Structure formats: C-alpha cells, structure tokens
Image (cartoon, rainbow, N blue to C red):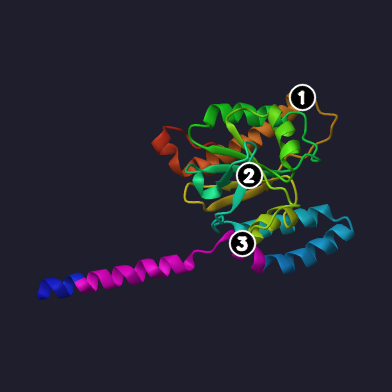
Amino acid sequence: MVRFLLLFLFLHFTNLFFGQKDEEKIFFSEALCLSMPKYEIKAKKAYEIRDYNRGKELFDSLVKFELNDSYMDNFKFNQINNKVISFYDFKKPVYLITYSSWCVASEGEIPALNQLASKYHDKIDFVILFWNDRKTTKHSAKIYNENIKIVYVDEKQNKDSYVIRQLKHSLGLPTTFLIDGNKKILDIRRGVTHSFEKSFEESFDLNYKLIYDGIANQLLGRESNYYGLRTAALN
C-alpha cells in the first residue's frame, strides 16, 4: 500500500511538473500574433522618416524578446516534385530561408550557402522556402546545391495556416530562421546587405561568415561536443 501511494505521488507531481513545462511552450504563430501590432506601428514610423537604424533596432528587439525561443509551427509546403512535405518531417536542426524569385542576392550569397550546405548537410537540414509558383521555383532551384531542400508556397493557392502568410508578410524577405532539432527558434536574421561595388571574394567572405556563425554558434553550438566541433565566435 505504501509503495502504491509513493508511486501515485511520484506520478502526480511528475505530471504537474511536465504539465507546467508544456504550458510555457509558445508557438511562433502565437508569438507573432501577440507582438506584431505594436512592432508594425513603431517600424512604420521609423521607415517613414527613413530612420533605418531605428528600424533595425526594432526588428532585433522583436526577434530577441518576442520571437526567439518560440517553437515553429508544423506547417506544410510543396516540393518541386509535386509532393507535399511538413516542417516537422525535418528531424535535424534547420537553416530555413524564406525567399522569392524577385529578391536580388548579393554576388557571394548563394555560392557561400552552397559550400556550407555541402559541408554540413549531414548535421543540418538546409531549406529554402520560395513564395512563388512551381514553375518559377523549379527554375530558381537550379543554382542551389543538391543538399539544399527547395520548397514553395504559391500564395494564389495558399489556404494554409496563419503562420504561412505571416512568414512572408510580417518579417519581409529574405529572412533566415535558425531552428534546433526540437523546432525551437534560436534566432531570426536578415541577410547580408552590402554595396554591389564589392568584389565576389569580399561578398563571398561576408556571407560565408554570417551563415557559418549561425551554424557554429546556434544550430550546432549546443551539440558541438557531440559532433566534435568547437563553437566559433566570429567578430
């Protein structure tokens, strides 16, 4: 009887503990819904007067205090082979970029991403989500490394969840999401911005460092001991 009572109490408090943990979990769509109204008002004012530094500060604050540590929703998108895939089908940490064919990449961006995807695809799922139709996405996919998963959402046909629409319209394009294996968002970043006067080597170097920083310090930072890697701190 005593053993049964002890077991009952153990299970009861264990359920309470883990129940509280589950209650603290917030999804990206929820965090976005709660934080976007105030952010959009302040950001609009900043950009109206061309205060781009203030705009960047607001974005960084939104990410750091409102969106980081939320969990990405399990939304669906299309592959160029016409098959549908869910975000939770990716089991590794995910380097996700939301993109569109009208975005103009800096000269070294895609080569840097291709090289790092080739090197780290066994530890990370590299995913590019295009906001285009299948034909346009298929054409755009040709310049990417085979280890990068190219998916798309055709907004004209999109009848999916709130998070699908907000991934494009709330944070702009292109935007990079660094997501761990449990689907927790570790960071959200904008791409490298530089003048088109820079050489290919300079552009490649800037993009490589930014992407590698996300890989080493975020996606693999917590697992670096397992993989035998040293966490990098890039200046």
Q: In this view, does 75 lie to the left or right of 21?
A: right
Q: Quadrant of the N terminus?
A: bottom left
Q: Give the range drawn in magenta.
A: 8-34
Q: Does the magenta stretch include residue 9?
A: yes
User: Is there a contact, CB below 8 Å, between mark 2 and mark 1?
Assistant: no
Residue 18 in sight: yes
Q: Which element type, helix, strand or loop, lies under badge 1?
A: helix
Between disc 2 and disc 1, the foreground one is 2
**Extreme residue toward the left, this view:** 1
Pinpoint residue 93: horizontal percent, then vertical percent: 51, 43
Q: What residue type is labelled 2?
A: Asn
Q: Which element type, helix, strand or loop, lies under badge 3?
A: helix
Task: Specify the quadrant of the image occupied by residue 146.
Answer: top right
Which residue is labeled 2 in the image?
A: 78
Pinpoint residue 232: horizontal percent, then vertical percent: 54, 36
Q: Is residue 63 left or right of residue 193?
A: left
Tell me the CA gap for discs 3 and 2: 20 Å
Residue at the (60%, 65%) spot, across then down: 30
Is residue 228 positioned above or below 201 on the image? Answer: below
How many numbered discs, if any?
Answer: 3
Tell me the CA gap for discs 2 and 1: 33 Å
Task: Specify the quadrant of the image occupied by residue 127.
Answer: top right
In the rendered structure, find residue 29 and report the number of the disc placed on it: 3
Looking at marks 3 and 2 on the same chain, the residue that comes earlier in the sequence is marked by 3
Mark 3 crowdedness (10 Å alpha carbons): few <14, some 14-19, many ≥20: some
Q: Does the magenta stretch include residue 193?
A: no
In the rendered structure, find residue 200 and report the number of the disc placed on it: 1
Q: Which amino acid does label 3 sit on?
A: Ser
Looking at marks 2 and 1 on the same chain, the residue that comes earlier in the sequence is marked by 2
Between disc 1 and disc 3, the foreground one is 3
Q: Which amino acid does label 1 sit on?
A: Phe
Mark 2 crowdedness (10 Å alpha carbons): few <14, some 14-19, many ≥20: some
